Amino acid sequence: MSKKSNTMRELVKILAAMPAVVLPVVLVWGYIAFFPMHYFDGETPYYFWNRDISLTPSKKEYSTVILGDSAANAAYLPEVLSEDTINLSLGGTTPVENYYVLQDWLSMHANPRVVYLSFMDYHLIYDNMFYERTVYSHRLRDSQEREILAEARECLDENIAVSDAEEKLVEYHLYSPRLYLPALLNAGFSQRKSQNEETYKAVDFHRGAYIGLTSQMYMDTDPNIYDSYPVNPLYDRYYHKILDLCKEKGIQVRIVSLPKTGNSLLKNSFRNSRDGYYRGLEETYENVTYVSAVDTMDNRYFLDWEHLNIYGSWAFSALLKSAFPNDFSKEPLSDDTVIGQLEYLKLMKEPDLLCQSITGKEFSAVLISEDKALAAKAGAKDTGTMMNRKHIFLRSEVLHGASFNENDGKDDTIAIVNNEDGTTALRLKDQWYPAAIDDYAGATLILISHRDNNVVEVRNYLSNGTGYLLK
Amino acid sequence: MQFDSFYFFLTAPAVVLVSYLVPGKFRNWFFLLLSLLFCYTFTKTAVLVLAGFIALTYGFSLILEKKKSKPVLILAWILIGAVLVIYRLADPLTNTLFHLPLPVSLAKAIGLSFYTLNALSYLSDLCGGKIEHRLSFVETALFLSFFPTVTSGPLLRAGEFAEEMRKEKPLSYEAVRDGFLTLLVGYVMKLVIAGRCALLVSAVYGNEALRGFPVVLAVIFYSLEIYTDFAGYSLIAKGLAKALGFEIPDNFRQPYFSSSIKEFWRRWHISLSSWLRDYVYIPCGGSHGSRLFKYRNLIITFLVSGFWHGRGLTFLVWGLLHALFQIVEDVIASKKKTKPSWSFGAAVLTFVLVSIAWVFFQSDSVSGALSVLLRCLSIEHYGDIFTPMISSWGLDARNWCFLVIGLLIITAIDAKEYASSSVKEWFLSLSRPLQLILVWGLVLLVLFSLNLSGTEFIYMQF
């Protein structure tokens, strides 16, 4: 037998044996590559949502778009801000990734009127998670990642322009088991698929808000010292790219410095350097406003040292809304938004925190009810007026609140009135909303004193079909 | 490119198959090109320094072939040895030797300590007449740079490797299969065991609060780590070479079953031990002469071994300990009339002694090593195994599971091989479905340990 035919025979034997041997590898690798939702950790679905929503045309137009990192994701609650706000911020990202998120968004959607841009300061200074989160989750396209790599090389960025960058990108693109096995192993036999699908739906429902949806509170008291603000050249370059893109599209930009924890110590060198950088951008771009109204907030408004919790997010969003009322549409709230707000409120065990932070008044009253009919009667008619005159800061079909000083109470800003027939009615200002209820629901009125941060009164009401009865 | 990198897994099967499509007369050139590319994936410097060595070695071989001149050989030893000494003594962080800057960053010269020894043995054998004909240029280059062995050995002997380079290598299913199986066992050792041992060792050593049992366990696991890491690498190299049609020598033969330190060195890093025997111990006089003379040669040999492994006193102490252990063994053995036979107790004692020496090998300083040994002696902490502290030892339940399974497999293989029966033959005697199930089991074990890959093989730093 000739050498050639021997070789062919051996080759056939090897090739025939190979599939059987590599079968487990193929199966595991295939699973990793084609079923990421089955094993990815809980944070990844919102990257997927971000990619899907950005690259899919939608009927709805959003006039306000939020960009930034996880701190921005936690801080901005679209449901509190307006009906046409969407939060496209992504955890672990910097202006680099956000430029492409905006680019993607603009390629498929109408230009928004305003873009809000917020990053935790360290994301502009220190290490980022470009490979570990952005590339890992396949949020960007290959061409975008390569463009980033090229820019990073020009800027001598050591985090992204690593020596094996090309290899890393390919390895991530091909779902190398080495990189994705930890998630797969951690997932084990747990039902991450259903959890991830739930997360995806929740993120979609809350229009991108995800990180801050917890009432967990940050307890640390050790000082966090901020003393300098050296912006990484690559991030600076991409900051300019975002602003250039917005300028080109006629989009207003608000760069908002996010609040830090109460135990943060902001040195003047830090403030001057940070503010100087953003003021510089403000001067360069006429479409840019720099906002740094709240440097710190109490630790109870944070879930950790950098992310606001649900109290902080709501308070921050409400403050922002009152500071820039024209950025957020007055469009009536949709059912989904109302339900979204209710979900947030359900997370809150101490609503006084929320009230106090927003109003600065002595007392707050919060009414929480799942009864839309009650809510509708409680005054969806004159939102703007009521907000201005009576400091009613939260208005929806399910939530009513008012804050007032002691003397204000005399004008019956908010009152529960017991009717002769045993039912209860709400009184807001001079209007009475008799409790004619269509369907079953309960309501809770919480009266909070901000003098000592105590809940003065909690009244629970149950609907009996015709009105509310004190429980 | 590490042997456990994604790209290696992707490219290795293709390289093996393509190599057989290259016509025989170009195959060595093909392997040389691959080897240089392989080095290039680490650093450009690695290729440059290697190229320099190839030229130097080839130049000396031309001279020595014409005239077997001892002075020329000595000059070669001085020149090549000097580079190795500089490499060892230089500060890799600052790239200086005694504060003097070096023109080339030798720290980036991957595999230098291995191919220098290969070069020295080749030139010595050529001069001593053990090799009749010198290697051609491409053979010299391939001998020094052969990619399966260039970074961490095993060390090769030019005479044997010349035959491998020159022999015909027809594509053989058996060779590829055997190569794959060897490779697979190597990966089990490296990824399933060594990777997890490393987690435990670094967690325990790094936690000064841990004393007693956990530290003893870390000492034991470091012994297992260095064995499975290096022997695993050697098997991967051997398996890869086998699949490419090359036979390279075994580097380990169940060293932890040894019942004496002497036996241990016949089974541990065999290619280095035999190199030291042939080019240091015997030229120094070997076992000839008085007992003191023999012990002196032993100490010199092990000090050289320690120096070869790294800069710092700890390596010299490690070498010295091994020499002293053997001297004590020799003294005891000389008083006994019967030839010592294998016993479990002797194997355990040998393992303990070797493990104690590894503490010095692993530590940054002698005082650090002594501190680890002192921490082992905290008897009051020996009950810690029954406390929740076990969770602070760097391994979770899943990793413990993988580690235990891996250790059982390798222990079974080693035990069978030590008893002189071939695991390969046993495997081939099984039915095809059973073979496949076993292979799948090992492949899955390795696959689910890949997240521990990416760490450097320990012996790459030597």
Image: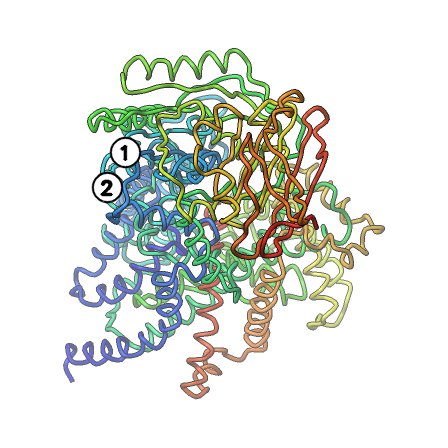
Amino acid type at mark 1: Pro
Q: What crowding class fits label 2: few (fewer than 14 Cα within 10 Å), some (14-19), or many (20 or more)?
A: some
Q: Label 2 is found on which chain of the structure?
A: A
Q: CA distance from mark 2 to mark 1?
A: 8 Å
Q: What crowding class fits label 1: few (fewer than 14 Cα within 10 Å), some (14-19), or many (20 or more)?
A: many
Pinpoint residue A431: horizontal percent, then vertical percent.
Answer: 53, 34
Q: Secondary structure at mark 1?
A: loop
Image: A257 above or below B404: above
Q: Label 1 is found on which chain of the structure?
A: A
Image: A24 above or below B360: below
Residue B334 disc label = none
Residue on which the image places disc 1? A112
In the rendered image, which quarter is residue A446 located in?
top right
Residue on which the image places disc 2? A109
Q: In screen coordinates, is B229 left or right of B218?
A: left
Q: In screen coordinates, is A78 left or right of A113?
A: right
Q: Please give the name of the residue rendered at 44% of the width and 14% of the height, measured from the top-left corner.
A: A273
Pinpoint residue A122: horizontal percent, then vertical percent.
Answer: 47, 28
Q: Secondary structure at mark 2?
A: loop
Pinpoint residue B61: horizontal percent, then vertical percent.
Answer: 29, 47
